[in-house]
Amino acid sequence: MRHSVLRSGFLLAALLAAAPFPAMAGEKEEKAKAAAAEAAFRSAYAAASADPKARSKAVELLRDAPDSLKVSLILDGVLPRDDAPAVQRSATVVLRTVKDPSCVKELLDQAQKKAPWSIRGVVVDALGGIEDPAALAGLRKLAKDADPMAAASAIFALAERHPPEALEEVKKALVHSQWQVRLAALEFLARLEDITTVPLLCDRLEEEDGRLKQEVVEALKAVTGRDYKDDALKWRAYAAGGVEAAEKAGAGAPDPAAAGGGRAVATGAAPVEPTYYGEKVVSDKVVFVVDFSLSMNEEMIIDRETIVRETGAVVTGSEEEAKAKGAPKEGEVVPIEWWKIRTRMDFARSQLKYVISTLKRDQYFDVIWYSDSVVAWQGGLVPAKPGVKLKAIQWLDEQKCEGATNIWGGLTKALNLVGKGTQDENYSRGADTIYFMSDGAPSVGDIKDPDAIVDAIERIHKVRRVKIHVAQIGTSKMPFMQKLAAVTGGNYRFFKAGEPKKKE
């Protein structure tokens, strides 16, 4: 019996030695898994070399890696050395899978640091997709940060899950001095869809101008499912008594444009709303970016009816009528002289002269033209006074088409008028909307790949929040141009250049 027990004891000891406890086995498996994930990532990342898309795919291999490993490799290895937009986007996606509380804390610590925004912005964006309550608390704290870029980014991240408990921070953000922070608050409220916030939005409707006023209207529509445009009186009536009360409410405050006030067009008696290729110019801080490359000299066939239908612009009648009326005087609307349009540049120039002439007194603007070089008319926003607009139109008439197509250069020049953060006064005072026009794909510049340009603009948009409306002239629609508008929330408009008429 004793020998039997001893033999059993020796057998048990041997089994234990051969097979460790489940916890030890699990630990070894985790280490092996981590080692394999790290090896796969490092191998793929090294092989990717100069290809940002391949590097982004290498980062995505970390999705199923242990949280501590993915956080360490991304924060300490990838982001400090690789600011390619595609890589940053993949890093955001991977970090959103973090669940380990200690790793969430590490991300929160990084978000609070005054680190480069190429790192900090990715972390803040990722925290918006993490369900841990600590992530929510950290973002609420960051929403009060003195840096408006950090505060706005935190509120946009909160908007993704729009937790009601963050409403107090959002209410304060609604009256922030920086427009990007107020825009973030509007995004949060639009997603929250809480009918009790309508009075707050009505307050902003009465205070905001330009693009932000329209953003308030969009938020009200999202919250209520109704559309009373910018009539604050109707919106307040709806909040108090529903649809019937709103219908009985008056027309609200009169449009100052109708009385020749600050929003009146600096032209004759009948105000004309500014439009550019048919897109309403609602912002009061805009930059027009126009393609002056050599291809813009190509022939364009377009008739008067098409221009009226597609753009809604003021168009002259016949050539004889236009000559009889004479050239527009300072402060008057410059109509589209359709009979003069023979090339793409003729059409583009006429659209730009028209929109500048219809800008209102309290709107600010600048013009950037690009070919292989990039030139800004003023290099900063100027008020749309009659004399200023006339000088801009005269300057446009002097420009000639030349060179290749540096789309990235034109866009970055315009984005420099938007600003980067606290130390840049343009962050609050700069343009909030860009109207971009081109007739073709990029051919020169620091970035020539269309997908890379879209990736970069999308990443920049997460910070600057500038909206880009795109007008394209050409023989067919370009997905690149459509994406460029879509990633910033802008609209895309296409104008067919037309084919020359065949001789009989």
Image (cartoon, grey):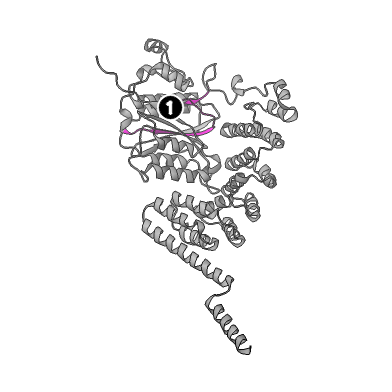
Q: Amino acid at mark 1?
A: Leu
Which of the two residues, 335 or 220, is positioned nearer the viewer here?
A: 220
The one of 135 and 253 positioned closer to us in this rendering: 135
Residue 389: image x %, image y %?
A: 46, 27
Residue 345 painted magenta: no
Numbered range of the magenta stretch: 273-293
Residue drawn at 35 percent across, 34 percent down? 440
Residue 388 coordinates in the image, percent (x, y): 47, 28
Task: Write down the quadrant of residue 212 in the picture.
Answer: top right
* Quadrant assignment, res 334: top left
Residue 385 seen anywhere in this rendered image of the structure: yes
Q: Is residue 7 above or below residue 303?
A: below
Q: Nearer the viewer, residue 342 or 353?
A: 342
256 above or below 121?
above
- Secondary structure under tag 1 reads helix
Judged left or right of residue 275, residue 326 is left
